[in-house]
């Protein structure tokens, strides 16, 4: 309950960026299992560890085993904690169906504690059941497998927006006039370039509230992206995050990393007369040189 209480203020702060709409859809019924079992592999692994821990524990207790939940404080604490978290998840699911949807697995930070408790229970039972030397080897093997799983699950460069996987570099690298700015339509494209490009000041993120209002279904996280980037600019003072109108006043010619699911360039076409030249493209993105008349 303490973890949930500490987590709620962060969640409420995150909800303020979902105005006038957020990217989360109302959750279906089967999503109720996701706070504890976020995917199939995690679910199967957690169930296997619970069954193994229970079987080892029952064997150690022997035939005289008698369960008294109220007398066993440790077991009672675990059951009450799981029950409280389950009820909380159900309440959030109902609220997401009736009001503002917030039912997303990664927002359920307390679920990490639930899964951690399963792993600890399994490790404790294995350590008690195995000989000391074998238990040490098993612990080392589990740690190695955990690090390997983390490395395999880490995102690769190919997940960056407008990234050329064949050349292993940004789509615009080596094919643009470096004296012209490059407009990125999403934070997913802007942040990697702002931090890893040799010319980070060349990349601009346009703040355009008109896109948020006119294209709520083109990209569901338009509003969230706008608010996040606006707050990031306010905190850091980075001058390359600026309103679209201010960009056009300063620069009549620039490049656009146009993601096909985004609507910034389409909105710009409806407001200005543009001359466009496609310089490079990928399956989901196009590098377009734009001149505004």
Image (spheres, rainbow, N blue to C red):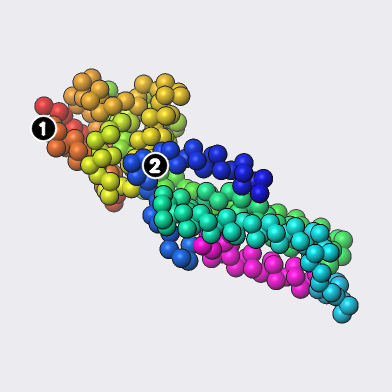
Q: Residue at x 44, y 32 (%)?
A: 196
Q: Position of residue 44 (x, y in %)?
A: 60, 68
Q: Position of residue 90 (x, y in %)?
A: 53, 59
Indicate the quadrant where residue 84 lies: bottom right
- Whether residue 269 is situated above or below residue 80 in the rendered picture: above
Secondary structure under the numbered disc 1 in the rendered image = loop
Neighbourhood count class around disc 2 (C-alpha, 10 Å): few under 14, some 14–19, many 20 upward = many
- Whether residue 111 is situated above or below residue 195 in the rendered picture: below
Indicate the quadrant where residue 244 lies: top left
53 on left or right of 168: right
Residue situated in front as seen by the camera: 49 or 132: 49
Q: Which residues are magenta?
A: 32-57
Query: Are circles 1 and 2 on residues that touch, CB within 8 Å?
Result: no
Q: Main secondary structure of the magenta part?
A: helix
Tag of residue 273: 1
Q: How far, Cα to Cα, is label 1 from label 2?
A: 32 Å
Residue situated in front as seen by the camera: 181 or 119: 119
269 on left or right of 96: left
Tag of residue 18: 2
Q: Does residue 149 appear in this view?
A: no
Indicate the quadrant where residue 259 lies: top left
Q: Nearer the viewer, mark 1 or mark 2?
A: 2
């Amino acid at each position: 309950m303490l973890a949930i209480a500490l987590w709620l203020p962060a969640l409420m702060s995150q909800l303020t960026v979902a105005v006038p709409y957020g990217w989360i859809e109302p959750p279906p019924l089967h999503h109720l299992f996701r706070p504890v079992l976020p995917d199939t592999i995690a679910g199967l692994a957690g169930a296997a560890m619970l069954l193994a821990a229970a079987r080892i524990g029952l064997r150690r207790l022997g035939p005289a085993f008698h369960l008294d939940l109220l007398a066993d404080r440790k077991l009672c604490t675990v059951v009450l904690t799981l029950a409280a978290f389950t009820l909380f998840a159900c309440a959030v699911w109902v609220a997401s169906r009736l009001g503002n949807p917030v039912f997303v697995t990664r927002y359920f930070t307390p679920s990490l504690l639930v899964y951690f408790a399963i792993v600890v229970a399994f490790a404790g039972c294995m350590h008690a059941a195995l000989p000391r030397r074998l238990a040490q080897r098993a612990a080392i093997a589990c740690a190695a497998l955990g690090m390997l799983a983390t490395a395999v699950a880490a995102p690769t460069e190919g997940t960056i927006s407008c990234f050329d996987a064949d050349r292993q570099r940004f789509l615009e690298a080596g094919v643009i006039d470096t004296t012209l700015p490059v407009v990125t339509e999403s934070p997913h494209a802007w942040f990697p370039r702002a931090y890893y490009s040799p010319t980070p000041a060349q990349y601009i993120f346009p703040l355009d509230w008109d896109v948020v209002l006119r294209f709520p279904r083109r990209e569901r996280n338009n509003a969230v992206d706008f608010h996040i980037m606006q707050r990031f600019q306010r905190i850091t003072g980075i001058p390359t995050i600026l309103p679209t109108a201010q960009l056009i006043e300063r620069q009549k010619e620039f490049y656009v990393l146009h993601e096909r699911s985004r609507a910034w360039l389409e909105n710009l076409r409806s407001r200005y007369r543009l001359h466009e030249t496609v310089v490079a493209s990928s399956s989901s993105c196009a590098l377009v040189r734009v001149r505004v008349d």
